[in-house]
Amino acid sequence: MTDMYYNRAKQEGYRSRSAYKLQQLHDDAGIIQQGDTVVDLGAAPGGWLQVATEIAGDQGTVIGVDLQRIDPIDGVELIRGDMTEPDTHAAVRAATETADVVLSDMAPNMTGEYNLDHARSVYLAEQAFETAQTLLVGGGDLAVKVFDGPDTDRLRETFDDAFEYVRTIHPPASRDSSSELYMVGVGHLTAPLAEGDRLSVTVEDQGREGDGIAKIEGFTLFVPETTAGDEVEIEVVDLKPRFGFARVVD
Ligand code: SAM
């Protein structure tokens, strides 16, 4: 069977047709910036690594991890290991303290038994999520492959709590018959709080728009209708990667 992306990858020098999936995810969600540190899990044979290095450029850092050996790529650090093993998580942390982007195209060995393949793919996606929680800077992005199924919604809820917003994308380069989708978390939240949290704060300062500012472990919360010196009970209503909004509760 001729496959357009397979042929294109051969012609354009990409190691896999998957390269186009990352390009399409990036075109759609703007995941990688020049100069970024990118950690790519399940990276063999290296199509995504090629695309990530092209976008991150000379100032970027790209690290690839896989169970399989990956042929060297200029400027890419490679780790051979199993992301379900703590040693591999430690090796990734030793390679970089932070990342702007975490990618995972990890896929389990397929058994053909739909629910089992789905459950294993969700487990791999959770390993990628854990890596992202450890490494991602505030505002960083995570894109993870998962085979769609009953646990996709639960995975999405986990992403929802950790990112400014989440999208699920089925890139055109994914085969039509494939149940794979990519869950993309944009804008990693580093707040030491969650939306809906209630707490007592002292308003310390006044923002340019006139809102009161409270600091929680250095994280800025804007609290409308308060002024410096107020001691108020608040509820967190909206979190962005680097600041949030709260309302006064009675
Ligand atoms: N994105 C790659 C590219 O562009 O060339 C293709 C990745 S391929 C679809 C999936 C990869 O996930 C395989 O190379 C496989 O070895 C890897 N993988 C699966 N389970 C893994 C695990 N537990 N730890 C590390 N890599 C894993």
Image (cartoon, rainbow, N blue to C red):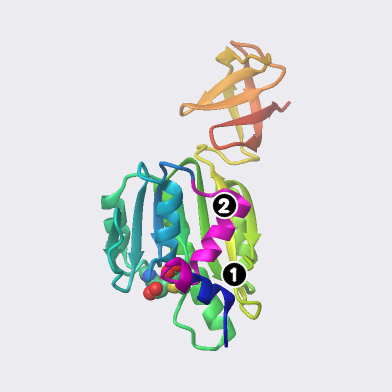
Res 115 seen here: yes
Q: Nearer the viewer, residue 200 or 166?
A: 166
Q: What's the residue type where badge 2 is placed?
A: Gly
Residue 196 lies, in percent from the top left, at 65, 40
Of the numbered discs 2 and 1, the one sitting upstream in the chain is 1
Q: What's the residue type where badge 1 is placed?
A: Ala
- Judged from the image, the secondary structure of the residue bearing numbered disc 1 is loop
Give the numbered dot on residue 185. 2
Task: Sort mark 2 into few (<14), some (14-19) or many (20+) by Cα contacts within 10 Å.
Answer: many
Residue corresponding to mark 1: 173
Residue at figure coordinates x 51%, y 73% from the top left: 121
Q: Quadrant of residue 245 in the image?
A: top right
Residue at figure coordinates x 59%, y 10% from the top left: 229
Give the numbered dot on residue 51. none
Q: Which of 158 and 73 is in front in this view?
A: 73
Looking at the rendering, in which quadrant would you find the C terminus? Answer: top right
**Number of labelled discs?**
2
Instruction: State the separation of the CA atoms marked 2 and 1.
Output: 20 Å
Q: Quadrant of ligand 1?
A: bottom left
Residue 89 lies, in percent from the top left, at 32, 59
Q: Are marks 2 and 1 in contact (CB under 8 Å)?
A: no
Residue 186 to residue 110: above or below: above
Q: Is residue 172 magenta?
A: no
Chief SS of the magenta region: helix
What are the residue bounds of the magenta stretch?
10-32
Residue 4 lies, in percent from the top left, at 58, 75
